[in-house]
Amino acid sequence: MGVLHLGHDEVRNCRVLAWLLDPLGAHGLGDRFLRSFLVLVNDSRPDSTPIELSDLDLVRILVEEARGDTRADIVIYGATWCVLIEAKIFAAEGRQQLTRLAELWAPDDGELVCVFLTRDRHSSMISAGDHQWDRCTWRELAGLVRACLEDGQDAQLDQGHPGAAGRPAAYEYLRAMETYLT
């Protein structure tokens, strides 16, 4: 990311982050990073219904999904919930951006969970219209990625494992996150 001068490129970082969140991604993490992220989100919303963590291999993850004249950076669709991630690196929130996103992605049935991903955490939660946005930092995500990469399951990744080829890319992205985003 640094060599390509993409360390602060929001769209590219969201694409790699979505790849790491995908249980079927060729990173060898399975659903560990997604599960860790969802636990972090659940822990930040103690008074809300927790996101169901079963059947994570059935989630759909989209990047730059557009609705109307708005686009969501990352959307994670579960069976009964939707997690909407609005990521910022240096840009500020657009005028009523979080309100528009929450309104456009509110599911007819199920729960919408909104996460505002930034470089720093000024408050734990912000309101936008009728929706609460939980804050999360790139540093927190980097810590989760590091923990997942170093949790001892690497020994299972021999050259024949589908995730073996992507493991170096996951480590390289972790270094980029720690260098450019934290």
Image: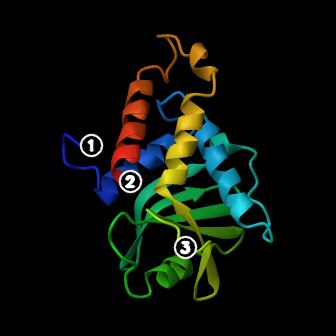
Picture disc at residue 181: 2
Question: Label 3, label 2: how many angstroms apart (C-alpha)?
Answer: 27 Å
Circle 2 SS class? helix
User: Looking at the picture, does residue 39 appear above or below residue 88?
Assistant: above
Q: Earlier in the sequence, mark 1 or mark 2?
A: 1
Query: Which tag is nearer the camera, tag 1 or tag 3?
Result: 1
Expressed as whole percent of the image width and height from the top left, the position of residue 83 reads: 60, 62
Closest to the observer: 152 or 23? Answer: 152
Of residue 121 and residue 67, the one placed in the foreground of this image is: 121
Which numbered mark, 1 or 2, is in the foreground of this view? 2
Give the quadrant of the N terminus. Answer: top left
How far apart in space, not on screen, are marks 1 and 2 (Cα)? 11 Å
| Sequence-first tag of 3 and 2 | 3
Residue 1 is tagged as: 1
**Could you tell me the amino acid type at mark 2?**
Leu
Q: Secondary structure at mark 3?
A: helix
